[in-house]
């Protein structure tokens, strides 16, 4: 796992009461108690951290279901918008 | 308790700057949503809004008055003038002391705030215009309505985000019922389409990028609107004594707090407000022929509101005509409840249910009759207008048709 991916998971974990060690790529957001409003803040935190713009509309469900969805999509957005940041 | 009626209506909205133009557009299903024109939208992700068009403050005010008025106050004064003129009421010296002005607004002078703070923080200006504070204060619209029309009774602003207009009208209703005032000029106003406000709304991730299609399965969120609606309220006896045209009886207001979540609505809180409005108005669920829904077109609101209507109206929910006119005039936040009260009063008066436009496909979780795309002519004996605000503050207004020349009320 790259440093970027590690950092994304670390940020996700900071919004959850569940320990970082227990969070894997397969973990569902609902299982680690990240509610919709917290998720909006999480997206903001990721944008701030990596200086990117993440297209996300809370009315469109199903785009980010588990940790892998976020890691995969956010990593490719970082690459696309910032080039090689690592 | 005195019965209170609506005898004057004035509006400034994205679908018309007079009551008649507004009603015509709504019945025809015309949308006020389009690309934002007031400022450069290059740095916005969401570039659409329901802006008031062809409105130039300088056409309505003297130079000295105009320099004191933020856009939200301009809307309120212009709508208030139309409401008073429409009602035919004369505000004499004596009456002016027994007249209230109660206006709802969620945000106040956002244009003034945005323009001036940009100058300070970003452009490095050393001083601001001396009227910055009088223009942006949240009571500014109320104060200017009192000065413009010479009204000297109780006057103040009410803020409850998207329910501000409905809470204000409910408060004015209670002032007349209780005999504190004889007349009330009430409603809501908002001019929230500014760069800063749009960025704030964008950040909440609840905005549609294109259009507003409430209750439709493909809905993608809300579209910000702006404008004002103002009403003349008075007692039924007063209105009848002067032979006034009566749009509808304002029969009740139901209010509640969800006490649960700052942005997510609750079925229980919404249903309690609806039930309370009916109880206060002495109406049964089967008396309601029209519901003007809060209908913001967010995934969550439209499902929650549908469930709340089932819970509060029971079997009658399946038969009632519902529509969200936000599909046409957008979500004008603190003015929304007032603009929708105007829709509801005109619907009751003319016997026409305006449609929910942009309705393409039913959502299985939204199973009511939302009057898709085309207005419906029908007898409306009574109607409710729902407002469910961010922060979980709810206000529902109940309106009833008044039979011409009747001593009592129900038609």
Image (cartoon, grey):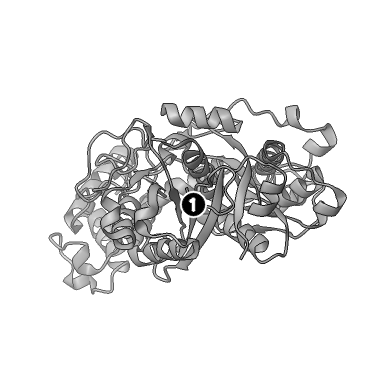
Subunit under mark 1: B
Residue at position x 19%, y 72% from top?
Answer: A21
Residue B115, horizontal then vertical, whole percent: 66, 41
The answer to whether residue B136 is visible is no
Instruction: Give the structural element (helix, strand or loop) at label 1.
Output: loop
| B19 left or right of B393 in image | right
Residue at position x 67%, y 41% from top?
Answer: B244
Residue at position x 26%, y 39% from top?
Answer: B218
Q: Nearer the viewer, residue B200 or B184?
A: B184
Residue B114, horizontal then vertical, whole percent: 63, 44
Q: Is residue B374 above or below residue B346?
A: above
Placement of the N terminus of chain B among the 4 image quadrants = bottom right
Q: Is residue B182 above or below residue B20?
A: below
| B89 left or right of A50 in image | right
Q: Nearer the viewer, residue B170 or B162?
A: B170
Q: Residue at label 1?
A: B410
Query: Farthest residue toward the left?
Result: A26
| B127 left or right of B164 in image | right
The answer to whether residue B324 is visible is yes
């Amino acid at each position: 796992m790259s440093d970027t991916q590690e950092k994304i998971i670390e940020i996700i974990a900071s919004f959850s009461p569940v320990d970082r060690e227990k969070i894997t790529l397969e973990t569902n957001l609902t299982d680690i108690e990240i509610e919709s409003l917290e998720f909006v803040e999480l997206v903001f935190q990721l944008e701030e951290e990596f200086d990117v713009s993440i297209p996300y509309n809370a009315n469109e469900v199903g785009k980010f279901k588990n940790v892998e969805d976020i890691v995969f999509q956010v990593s490719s957005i970082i690459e696309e918008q910032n080039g090689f940041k690592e | 308790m005195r019965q209170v009626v609506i005898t004057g209506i004035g509006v400034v909205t994205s679908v018309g700057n007079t009551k008649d133009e507004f009603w015509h557009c709504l019945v025809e299903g015309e949308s006020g949503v389009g690309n934002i024109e007031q400022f450069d939208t290059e740095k916005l992700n969401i570039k659409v809004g329901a802006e008031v068009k062809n409105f130039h403050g300088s056409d309505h005010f003297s130079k000295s008055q105009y320099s004191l008025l933020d856009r939200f106050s301009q809307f309120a004064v212009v709508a208030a003038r139309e409401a008073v003129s429409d009602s035919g009421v004369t505000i004499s010296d004596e009456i002016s002391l027994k007249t209230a002005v109660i206006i709802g607004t969620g945000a106040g002078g956002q244009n003034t705030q945005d323009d001036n703070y940009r100058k300070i923080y970003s452009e490095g200006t050393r001083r601001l215009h001396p009227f910055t504070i009088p223009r942006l204060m949240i009571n500014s619209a109320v104060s200017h309505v009192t000065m413009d029309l010479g009204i000297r009774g109780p006057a103040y602003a009410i803020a409850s985000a998207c329910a501000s207009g409905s809470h204000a009208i409910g408060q004015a209703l209670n002032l007349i019922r209780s005999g504190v005032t004889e007349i009330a000029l009430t409603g809501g106003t908002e001019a929230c389409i500014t760069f800063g406000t749009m960025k704030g709304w964008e950040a909440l991730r609840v905005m549609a990028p294109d259009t507003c299609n409430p209750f439709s399965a493909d809905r993608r969120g809300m579209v910000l609107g702006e404008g004002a609606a103002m009403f003349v309220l008075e007692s039924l006896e007063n209105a009848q004594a002067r032979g006034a045209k009566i749009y509808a009886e304002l029969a009740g207001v139901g209010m509640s707090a969800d006490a649960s979540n700052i942005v997510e609505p609750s079925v229980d809180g919404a249903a309690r407000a609806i039930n309370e409005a009916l109880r206060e108005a002495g109406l049964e669920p089967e008396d309601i022929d029209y519901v003007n829904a809060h209908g913001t077109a967010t995934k969550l609101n439209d499902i929650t509101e549908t469930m709340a209507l089932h819970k509060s109206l029971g079997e009658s929910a399946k038969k009632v005509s519902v529509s969200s006119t936000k599909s046409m005039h957008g979500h004008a936040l603190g003015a929304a409840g007032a603009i929708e009260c105007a829709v509801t009063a005109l619907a009751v008066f003319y016997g026409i249910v305006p449609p929910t436009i942009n309705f393409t496909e039913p959502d299985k979780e939204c199973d009511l009759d939302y009057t898709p795309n085309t207005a419906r002519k029908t007898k409306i004996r009574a109607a409710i207008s729902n407002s469910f605000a961010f922060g979980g503050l709810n206000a529902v207004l109940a309106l009833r048709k008044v039979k011409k020349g009747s001593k009592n009320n129900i038609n």
